[in-house]
Amino acid sequence: MIVLKAAQAKLLDALQSVAGIVERRHTLPILANVLLRKNGESVEFTTSDLEIQVRTSAELGGDSGELRTTVGARKLIDILRALPADQVVTLTANASGAANKLTLQGGKSRFTLQTLPADDFPLVNESVDFGPTFAVPQKTLRDLINQVHFAMAVHDIRYYLNGILFIAEGKTLTLVATDGHRLALAQSPLDAAVPTRQEVILPRKTVLELQRLLRDEETPIEMRFANNQAKFAFSGMEFVTKLVEGKFPDYNRVIPKNHKNIVSLGRLPLLNALQRAAILTSEKFKGVRLNVDPGVLRISSNNAEQEEAKEELEVDYSGDAIEIGFNVTYLIDALANISQETLRIELQDNAASALFTLPETPGFKYVVMPMRI
C-alpha cells in the first residue's frame, strides 16, 4: 500500500509542525513516534508527550485505502531533511498494513523503518467541559507571547510560575508572566466579548511550542479553556494541552501606580548601552547601576577584577536624581523582545520597583524589582 506520495518539502512541513513536543528519549518508546492515520489521500499526523497533543492533516496522495500506524518522528524528519527538497518521496506499507515496517523511498534512496501499533499510542482524553470559544489573529497572540514569555520562571518550586497566565474577560485578552523578581503583562482587545471570565495557566513547554508554531499573519487562532485543559485551533492544526494547577499571584498588586519620576528614551540606544555594560558583569553578579538626572541617564557596571563600564544617554527627564540598581539580564530580556522604539521608565526611589511601559502599546507593562549594588 502506498501510504503517501508527495514532495519532500510538503511532507517535512507537516511533520515538523507536530514534532516540536516529541522527546528523543522517553520512558514510553511509542512517544518518540508520530501517529499516522491515513484515510484516502489525506494523512493525519498526531504527536503527544502525555501532557500536550498536536494534530494536523495534509493531502499527500497515495492509495485510497486506510491505515493506522506509528513511526519514529525525529528519525523520519532527519531522513527527509537529508533528501533534496524538490524530490518526490513515497512511503509504503505492505498490502494488509499489518507488518511492523514502513518503507520510505526518494530517488535512489530507500529506508526501512520500524513501526509500533497505533492502538498503543496514548491519545489525550479531551475534557468535556470546555468554555466558550474566542479568537484573535495568530499575529496578535504571537506578539503577546513575545512580550511576556521571558519573564516565566524556569523549574521554580512554585510551579504556578513556570508558565503564562491567560485571562479572557469581557473584550480583553491578558497574558501575564512572572518569576518573582519581574513581571510582564500584555493585553489585546477581543472582537467579541467573552460571556464568562476564562482564566488558565499554560505550562512553559506549551507556551514555547505555541511561540514556534504561530504565524505572523492575520488568520485566527481559536481558543477554548476547561478546568484542566486548553485547546487551540489554527492553520489546520489542533493543539490540546494540560494546564498548570495553582493560584497565580495577584499581578495588579505588583504593578506600581503613581510613580512620579518618568524617563522617556529610545529603546534601542538603551538596549545597546546595557548590552555593552553587561560585558563587564560576572556570571554570579549581573548588577548594573542606573543614575538618572535631568536630561541624562548614566549606566555603570563593574566586576571583581576592578574593571568598569560606563555609558551615558540623553533622555527626556526632569524629575528627582535617582540611583538604582537592576539585574541587567532582566532589562535586556524585555528590551530585546519588544519592537517599539520609545520607552518610558517610571521610578519612585531606589527601593521601589520600576515600571517600564510603551507609549505606542498601552497594553504592555513590565515591572522589575531593584537590586542592591
Image: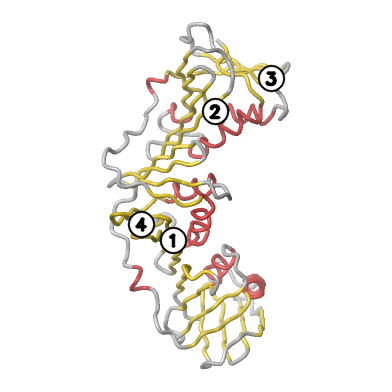
Give the CA distance from mark 2 to mark 4.
Answer: 33 Å
As helix, strand or loop, the secondary structure at mark 2 comes to strand
**Residue 280 place in picture, x, y as percent:** 64, 73
Nearest to viewer (mark 2 / mark 1): 1
Q: Badge 1 is on which residue?
A: 189
- Which element is circle 1 on? strand
Look at label 3 and name its amino acid. Answer: Gly
Front position among marks 3 and 1: 1
Element under disc 3: strand
Residue matched to label 3: 106
Neighbourhood count class around disc 2 (C-alpha, 10 Å): few under 14, some 14–19, many 20 upward: some
Disc 3 to disc 2, how far (Cα)?
Answer: 19 Å
Which is more foreground, mark 3 or mark 2?
Answer: 2
Q: Earlier in the sequence, mark 2 or mark 1?
A: 2
Quadrant assignment for the N terminus: top right
In the foreground, 68 or 143:
143
**Alpha-carbon span between mark 4 and mark 3:** 51 Å
Residue 193, numbered circle: 4
Q: Work out whether mark 4 precedes mark 3 in sequence or the reverse, and give the earlier one.
A: 3
Q: Earlier in the sequence, mark 2 or mark 4?
A: 2
Three-letter amino acid code of the residue under disc 1: Pro
Q: State the separation of the CA atoms marked 2 and 1.
A: 33 Å
The location of residue 302, given as percent across then percent down, is 61, 78
Residue that label 2 marks: 58
Q: Quadrant of residue 74?
A: top right
Q: What residue sits 45% from the left and 66% below the top?
A: 184
- Asked if residue 194 lies left or right of residue 313, the reply is left
